[in-house]
Image: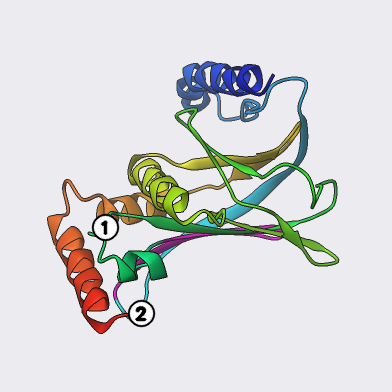
């Protein structure tokens, strides 16, 4: 059932992309639905992407909307077990998410991030306040998180987040410009930007020397 749902979402994404060109000629057309017809779109999050450099010159990418925020940042510091075992550097990106919890199940299934390519990334366990639901890329399995966050880094290097889902409910991300997404990708993609990779490897090595 889970596999069928994922295939359905990916199929509709491909269908959506076929019509993307038409929107350039017919701007009055509504953006094609992202989720399968049986899913309920809880809200379209109208917001904007913002690219920033931290004081340590680490690129960050954030999406801001009235009822939700998503942030991504490359990880420069080894986890405790990586430090103890002197594990070599592997590009990893952490994700933090905050949503209005109305209609969402705090004890339910993990949220998924969906990209325009049809790829998805499942977040870790949910936590909630009275009005907000919180989630991160961490599951608590240290080895699994290393591999998962490396996969997320690869997705973000060339794809754009377009929706968030939980079970049969979805939030669509709507933004007028994606320039900052492209800036983030330019900064963090190791293939065209080898200087970023060198900087991260250096920071990682320095952290290993200091110890945990």
Using residue 30 as the reference point, say whether residue 20 is left or right of it. left
Residue 106, position as x, y percentages in the image? 79, 52
> Which disc number belongs to residue 204?
none
Residue under label 2, please give it.
212
Assess disc 2: are there few (<14), some (14-19) or many (≥20) residues with their C-alpha within 10 Å of its C-alpha: few
Q: Nearer the viewer, mark 2 or mark 1?
A: 2
Task: Give me the C-alpha separation between circle 2 and circle 1.
Answer: 28 Å
Q: Secondary structure at mark 2?
A: loop
- Give the answer, above or below, for where 74 lies relative to 189: below
Q: Residue at x 76, y 27 (%)?
A: 39
Q: Residue at x 48, y 31 (%)?
A: 119
Residue under label 1, please give it.
187
Residue 138, position as x, y percentages in the image? 54, 56
| 72 in the magenta segment | yes
Residue 147, position as x, y percentages in the image? 39, 46
Using residue 160 as the reference point, say whether residue 189 is left or right of it. left
Q: Residue at x 14, y 61 (%)?
A: 195
- Quarter-of-image position of residue 194: bottom left
- Locate the C terminus by quadrant: bottom left
Stretch in magenta? 57-73
């Amino acid at each position: 059932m889970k596999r069928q749902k994922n295939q359905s979402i990916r199929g509709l994404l491909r269908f959506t992309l076929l019509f993307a060109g038409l929107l350039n000629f017919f701007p009055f057309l509504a953006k094609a639905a992202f989720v399968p017809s049986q899913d309920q779109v809880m809200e379209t999050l109208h917001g904007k992407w913002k690219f920033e450099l931290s004081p340590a010159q680490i690129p960050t990418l954030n999406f801001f909307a009235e009822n939700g925020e998503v942030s991504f940042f490359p990880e420069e510091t080894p986890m405790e077990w990586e430090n103890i075992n002197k594990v070599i550097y592997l590009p990893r990106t952490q994700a933090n998410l905050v949503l209005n919890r109305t209609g969402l199940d705090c004890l339910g299934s993990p949220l998924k991030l969906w990209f325009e390519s049809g790829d998805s990334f499942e977040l870790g366990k949910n936590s909630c306040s009275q009005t907000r639901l919180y989630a991160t890329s961490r599951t608590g399995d240290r080895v699994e998180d290393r591999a998962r966050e490396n996969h997320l880094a690869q997705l973000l290097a060339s794809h754009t987040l377009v929706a968030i889902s939980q079970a049969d409910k979805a939030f669509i991300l709507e933004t007028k410009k994606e320039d900052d997404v492209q800036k983030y990708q330019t900064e963090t993609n190791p293939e065209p930007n080898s200087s970023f990779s060198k900087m991260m490897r250096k920071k990682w090595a320095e952290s290993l020397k200091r110890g945990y």
